[in-house]
Amino acid sequence: MGAAFLAGALAALAMPPLYWLPLAVLGIVAFVWLWQTAPGPRSALLRGWAWGIGHFAVGSYWIVEAFFVPPADYALLGVPIVAGLAVLLGFFPGLAAGVTRRLVDRWPALGGRYRRLILLAIAWTVAEWLRGHLFTGYAWNPLGHVWAFATPLLQPAALFGVYGLGTLTFLVLAAPTAGWRASIAALVVLGIAGFAGQSMMEAGADDGPWVRIVQPNVAQAEKWRPENRSRQLAELVEMSRRPGFDRLAAVVWPETAPPFIVEPGSPALSIMARAVPPGGYLLTGAARSNGRPEDGVWNSLLAIDGSGAIVASYDKVHLVPLGEYIPFHKQLAPVSGFIGRGSFEEGEERAAIGLPGLASFSPVICYEVIFPGAVTGPGARPLWLLNVTNDAWFGLSTGPYQHLVSARLRAVEEGLPMIRAANTGVSAVIDAYGRVLASLDMQQQGIIDHRLPAARAATPYSRWGDWTLLALIGFFVAMLFVGGRQRAANTVATL
C-alpha cells in the first residue's frame, strides 16, 4: 500500500507544469506490477486505491491554497478537505484495478501480458470517464495531460477526446511491463503520433478581428473590499483603452471582473461602457442580479455595447460544489453561511452567442472548461470559445497551469480557437490545435492584443462526442476477444 501511494504521488509530478514524464512511466508501471502481484481482487482494489490517493493528493494539493486566502476563516479545513477529496478520487483507479483483477481471475485467457494491458487501459478509461461525470464530475488532470508539453501529441483528442487520449497514453506508459518489444513499439507509436500530429497542424490565419484580453492581477484578498471597487474598475477601463483600442472588435475581462454585483440600470454600466471599443463589445465575467434579491445571483458572462446596455448574457451552468453552490442552500441557510458567501444560482443551459460584427462564440466560465464535450451549446457550431476565469484563489500553485491545459484540450477536441481571460493568469490566446499563441503568466498585470485565430473543420469528437471514445473502446474489446480465441485455439492444438 505504501509503494502504491508513493507511485501514484510520483506519477502526479508528470502532470503540468512539471511534465516529469519518466515518473509517469514509473508510476503506471508500478500500478500494473502492483495489480499483477496482488493476491486477489480485494487486494488489487486496495492497492489501486492507495495509488489513487497519492496521485490525487499531489495533483490537487493546490486546492488548499483557497482556504488560506485572507482573512483565512477556513484555513484549518484545507488539508482535511483535500485529503478527503483524494480518498474519494482514489477510488476510481482502485475500482479499475479491482474489477479487472476479478475479470482475469474469472477468465484466465484475459491474463496474457498484452491482453492485461489492454484490459487495464479500458478499465482505466472507464474509471476516468466516471470520475468526470459522477456527482457532478471532477475531470481534473486526466492521464492524457502528460503530453501537453508537446502539442502534436495532443491531436488524437480531436478524434477520441481526452479520455481516448488517456487510453492510448496508458498503453504507451505501461508498455515496459510487457517486455522490450512492447517498449520499442510504444516509442515507435509515439514517434508516428508526433509526426502525424505535427503534419495536421496547419498555420493559423491572421486576418481575424482584433481582440484585447485584460489581465488586472487583483489579489483575491483585495478584490471584494468596498474601498477598492472604484480603483479596480478605473484600472480595468484604463487598461482596456490603451493604444490600439480603436481597432478592437472586443475587449475581454476575466471572471467576476467588476468587484460588485451588476444589475440592470446600474450606474456602473455607463463607466464600463468606456471600455467598449468603437462598434465593438466588452465581454466580461460578472456576478449578475436581475434586481430582485429573492431570485439570487448568477456567475455570468455579459456582452455590453457602447451605450452600456447588456446585449447578451450567459449564466454559468456547471457550478463548483461547495465553492459556488451548496446543495439545498436555500433550505439550509445556516450551513450556507458557515461555508462562505452562499450559492450562485445555476444557469439554464449552455449557449452560443452571436453579435453583429463578431463571430459566434460559446462562453465557458472557469471550472466549466475542464469538462470534455460540454463547452458548446445546442444549435449551430460557434466559431470560437471564450473562457473567463479567476484563479487568484490558488496563488502560484500548479493549479492555474493545469487549468490552462484543460482549456487547450477543449480547443483541440472542438477544433475551435479559445480566448482566455484570467484575473491573475494564465491569460492566453489558444488556436484550434491547442497551441498557445500569446499569454500572460501568473501574477502579471497587462493586456494581450491578438487577432482571433481561425476555426478548423469540425473534428470527429466535436461531431459525435463520446461515441468516438466508445468506438475506440469497442476496438480494444474486440482485440481482447480475438486474442482470447486465438490463445484458446493454440491451447487446444497443443493438447
Image (tube, helix red, strand yellow):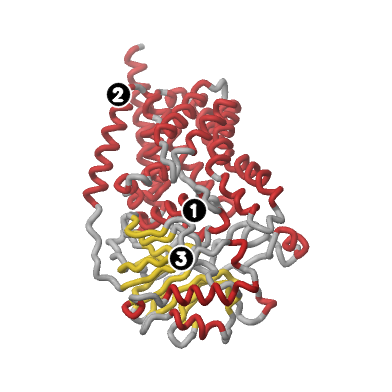
Is tag 3's residue or tag 1's residue first in the polypeptide sequence? Answer: 3
Along the horizontal axis of the image, is 120 left or right of 227? left
Along the horizontal axis of the image, is 69 left or right of 189? right
Is tag 1's residue or tag 2's residue first in the polypeptide sequence? Answer: 2
Q: Which mark is residue 215?
A: 3
Q: Residue at 37% across / 55% down in the picture?
A: 413
Q: Which of 64 and 345 is in front in this view?
A: 64
Tag 2 secondary structure = helix
Q: Position of residue 355 (x, y in %)?
A: 39, 79
Amino acid type, callout 1: Pro
User: Does the residue at mark 3 contact the one at mark 1 (Cβ under 8 Å)?
Assistant: no
User: From this viewpoint, is residue 372 visible?
Assistant: no
Task: Specify the quadrant that holds the C terminus.
Answer: top left
Instruction: Find disc 1 in the rendering and name its residue.
Output: 400
Q: Which of 250 and 96 is in front in this view?
A: 250
Instruction: Find disc 2 in the rendering and name its residue.
Output: 181
Question: Compared with residue 39, is residue 228 higher up or lower down, i.e. above or below?
Answer: below
Q: Nearer the viewer, residue 23 or 36?
A: 23
